[in-house]
Structures are given as C-alpha cells and as structure tokens.
Amino acid sequence: LTSASDCYFCQKLTRLDSAPDDDLVWRFPHSVAFLGPWQYFQGYCILVARRHATELNHLAVEVRRAFFDELCLLALAIEEAFQPLKLNYELLGNQVPHLHWHIFPRYADDPSRLKPVWLALERAEGDEAKKRRLQEGSLERPTIIKRLVEKLSLLSSASS
Ligand SMILES: [Zn+2]
C-alpha cells in the first residue's frame, strides 16, 4: 500500500502545498517533518513516512534506512537549534497506524524530564490551562520552524 484513503497522515501528505506555515518543517525524500503540537518541548517534531506502512519491517530495506537517516538528520537539527539535554524518539502508531516518529527534546528545567512525555500529556487531559502550557513554548511556532529550517538547510547542503 502506498496510501490509505482513511489514514490521517496519508490525507495530510496529499495536502502539503496548502499546509499552514506554522506546521510544515521540512520535506525529505522519504518523509516529511511537521512541528508537533506540544512546544513546551521546544522543537518537538513528528516525522511522517511518505509511504503508508504500519511497521518499520514492512518497508523495503533501502527505504527504511533512508527514513532512519532522515530521522537522524532532523534530530541533529533539533539538537543544534535548541541544545536539549536529551532527545526522546518514539514510534508508536497505536492511534494513527502510519509510521511516524515523535522526536521530543527534553530540557533541564522540565521537572518530569526523567519520565516519558506522555505521562505529562495524560495529566493535562481535561485541564485546559495545563494543556495550553504544554502547547505553547517560549517561542512562537513560526520562529521555532524558522530555526529548524536554517539548520536543516545547512545540514542538507553539507551532506549532498
Ligand atoms: Zn497512511
């Protein structure tokens, strides 16, 4: 399957040209990076495979490796742009079964930095103030994207 008509990410990928500019970060050959909704974790991105697949082992070897290299390039850009203490990588797909990596930068001033992000998100469920605090970072979304794009432009011109 290259796409699934009822898949959230497949549909999103068909509308890239009309994606809001506070959402799309970078187009790689095998994946597309979007800025994630929880920018308390400044630079949090979601890297979506261009091809519809539910498991990494369903991808052809070359595609899987390229997807992984793009993940690492995006991680490097996040690291260089924001100097987090640590990056968390998660590929779950329970809610949207189309391969996508969550890359969460973790920072020293996060009191829950030893725990997975999801626990904080779960605690914020039903609490609008908490939710907003996790959605809004100290920078505006377009500014965060601009910083990532600057790094990605440098990194991709260096690697080609
Ligand atoms: Zn899909």
Image (cartoon, grey):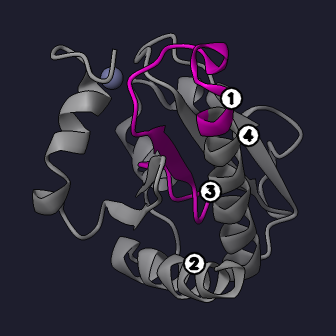
Left or right: residue 4 compared with residue 106? left
Q: Which residue is mark 1?
A: 61
Q: Which badge, 3 or 4, comes first in the chain's sequence?
A: 3
> What residue type is disc 2 on?
Leu
Crowd class of label 1 (few under 14; some 14 to 19; many from 20; radius 10 Å): few
Q: Which badge, 1 or 4, comes first in the chain's sequence?
A: 1
Residue 139 seen: no
Q: Which badge, 3 or 1, comes first in the chain's sequence?
A: 3
Q: Of the numbered discs in the image, which one, if any, rests on residue 106? A: none
Q: Where does the magenta region start and end?
A: 35-63
Q: Which residue is mark 3?
A: 41
Instruction: Mark 3 vs mark 2: give the one in front.
Output: 2
Q: Which residue is mark 2?
A: 152
Image coordinates of residue 49 in percent, x first then y, are 47, 37
Residue 16 seen: yes
Q: Nearer the viewer, residue 159 or 38?
A: 159
Is 28 situated above or below 82? above
Q: Is residue 93 magenta?
A: no
- Identify the element where label 1 is drawn: helix
Number of numbered tags placed on the structure image: 4
Left or right: residue 125 compared with residue 8? right
